[in-house]
Each structure stands twice: as structure tokens, then as C-alpha cells.
Amino acid sequence: MKPIAILFFICLLGGCSYLRLQQIPVPSREDWTMYGGGIGRTNVAHSSVDPPLAPLWEYDASAGFSPFSGAIAGDYLFVGNLSGEVHVIDIPTGKGIGRYDFGASIVGTPVVDRGLMYLALSRTEESLLAYNLVTAKIEWRAKVGDIETSPLLMNERLYATSLEGSLICADSRNGEIIWRFTLPLNLRTRTVRSSPASDGVVVVFGCDDGDVYAVGIDDGKLRWTAKTGGSVLASPSVTLGKVFVGSLDNTFYAFDAGSGNLVWKQPLGAKIYSSQAVNDHAVFVGTSGRTVFSLDAQTGRVLWRTTTNSVVNAPPLLSGNAVYVGSLDKTLYAFDSASGELLWQYKSEGRIKTMPLAAGHCLFLFSEDRSVMAFKHSGPP
């Protein structure tokens, strides 16, 4: 990671943490500034972290995490927790730089863009906000309803899915709602727990009604709908001209990003709760049946499969040649992306329900109840 001249000051005001950043971070290609690593949500790290790994430090984040993990800008890790706090951790030392309590549960990953941090909150009406890290002030709040997903930032527009069934597009500069796409009232259910992804043309998300929706980024009009056989809780990935997503019908799908037509589907024998990692050749996905699959991205053919000792509902992360997968058996696994061979594993103190992150040749693990750990390569395998 590029060194950045950033200094955080923390002071307690009325019992609440106060977070201030004096200079804007210098962007680095290894940054992970939103969930999935970019608008396509491919979960492919920009930094290669090869096993075996050794622990560097551990940080207590005060409360637990959702399956969505943190954001990285420069030498700092931004972590939201279910108690409504954002913690900022200095990556080289593992020391807490500061934290701020936003007063409502944070399920999705923060978005960090220059001197601003965008957050989506659950269990509150004013659920979308921008926090200025330089002035230590909330720039704006938007009333869009409960959000239990990760927002997406693209071309000064912030896209977010709300729990009650809307996709919102807001101006990231002032929070004004540009458009709102709302699912029809006659659906079996309109609950949305799937984060939006995009190819720069459409924004795509899944719904508990079993459908995947694609909406135009400029006008908010529905472009297409694709059906699965079960609720879609997972966040899609949009890449290679396709939309990749798993369903609770035990099947993984690839749809054409332009038309929504089915390209292929592959039964995996168990429910799929989490998103996937996708590179140019393969899709990596975990299931509730304790199995991790590698599928051919063009055909859906199973390239390899391997098992863990419990449910996998944390999204996998692809870093270099390793696929990192956490399991409810409290183990972080590293599998060879080409063969599925187990390269390394680490037994944590708590269950792993959150996707790991990688940046600056460090791997970050989030585990119950509230632990953040950093690892670094420890020598030849």
C-alpha cells in the first residue's frame, strides 16, 4: 500500500466518539473502497496474499459483524458493526484510530471515497448518509427506510436496496433522491437483502420473491427480470457480460447482463446464502451443505468441489491463486483456485460468517463475537 499522510484525532464529546481525518487518503490500486471490491462485486482482491499465513495482530471491534466486511483506504481499515459503530484501524500496527457511533445497526460495508464515508443503516428511516472524515460532520442523511445491504458508488451516484423493496439512486454530493425503483405490491414478498451490483449500464439485485431485477442506471426503469426457484439473498456479481448469483433453491445461475436470458444454471445440492467470487475463468461459491465449488464461468460445469466441516455462508475471497473461505466450523480455509487443493487453514476462536479482505499483502479475518485479525505471508509453503 502507498504510504499516506493521514492523521486521525479522536475526542469524546458527550460520550460519543468523534472521528476526524485531516488529509484525504491518496488512492491506491489495492484499496477496497466498497463491498465486492468494485461495482461488479466480483470479490477478487487487488492484492495477492499467498499462504501460509501468520497472525500479525487482533482487534476488538466491540460488536459482531454481518456477512459484509470492511473497506480499505490507504493504510486504514474501516469496519462497521451491528451496534452501529464504525471503527478505523491502522493496518501496520493494528491499533484503533477511532470510532463513531451512528446510532443504528450497520449491516452493509461502508463506502470510502476521498474524504467521505457513505453508510447504510438498519432499523431507522434516515438510513443513508455521508460522513465527512475531514470536518467530522454528517454531510447529509436521506430517508429511504431500513437497509441491510451494501451501497454502491458510481459516477457520483449512490445506489442502495431497501429492505421493503426499493432500489434508490441518490446524488452522493447532497443526498437528493434522483430516482426510486419500487417492486410491485402484488409480489409474494418484496423483501430485499441482496446488495446491488452493476456493469455501468444496469444495476442488478435479487429479491426474496426469487427474482433478479435489472434497472437502468440513469432513469431507474426496469430493464429485465429473471426468475430462480427460491429466494435470492445473495448479492450478484456482474462481469464477463453475465450476472452470477445463487439462490435458496440450491441452484447457481448465470444470466445475460443485457437481456436477463438464462445462460446456464448448476444445481449445487444445498442452499446458497452468500455471494461468490468471479475471475475471468471461474466462479467460486460456498453452500449451506458445507461444500465449496468452482464452476466454469462460461458453461457452469463443475471444475472442482471440496468440503468444510460446517455451513459456508460467508462469501469467498479470491486473492492471487488462493480462494479464502470462512466456515461456521470456526475455520478459515485457503484452497488452490485451480485445483481445490487445501493450501492452509486457521482455526479461530469464533464462527466465521463474514468475508475476509486482502490488501497490502495482508489478509483480514472477521470472526465472532467481534474479532478482527490480520495475517501476513509467513514463508514458503
Image (cartoon, grey):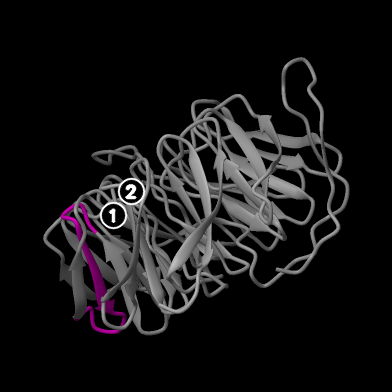
Q: Is residue 11 magenta?
A: no
Badge 1 vs badge 2, beta-carbon distance below 8 Å: yes
Q: Is residue 128 visible?
A: no
By secondary structure, the bulk of the magenta-drawn segment is best described as loop
- Residue at 77 percent across and 15 percent down: it is 14
Nearer to the camera, 246 or 367: 367
Q: Measured along the vertical axis of the image, is residue 10 above or below residue 15?
A: below
Q: Dot 2, how many residues are within 10 Å of its Cα: few (below 14), some (14-19), or many (20+)?
A: many
User: Could you say where residue 85 lies in the image, as x and y percent from the top left?
Assistant: 60, 32
Residue 149 percent coordinates (x, y): 47, 45
Q: Which quarter of the rendering shows the N terminus?
A: bottom right
Residue found at x 57% / y 30%: 84
Q: Amino acid at mark 1?
A: Asp
Q: Residue at x 23, y 70 (%)?
A: 293
Magenta residues? 287-301
Task: Name the quadrant of the C terminus.
Answer: bottom left
User: Helix or strand or loop: what does disc 1 sit on?
Assistant: strand
Q: Is residue 236 above or below residue 302?
A: above
Q: CA distance from mark 1 to mark 2?
A: 6 Å
Identify the disc placed on residue 247: none
Q: Kindly give the residue lying farthest to the left in the view shown.
A: 269
How dense is the environment of label 1, judged by Cα within 10 Å: few (below 14), some, or many (20 and up)? Answer: some
Residue sitting nearer the eye, 235 or 222? 235
* Residue 345 rendering spot, x and y as whole percentages: 34, 62
Q: Which structural element holds mark 2? A: loop
Q: Residue furthest top?
A: 14
Label 1, on which residue? 211
155 relative position to 41: left or right: right
Please state which amino acid type lies under the numbered disc 2.
Cys
Q: Which residue is mark 2?
A: 207
State whether residue 225 appears in this view.
yes
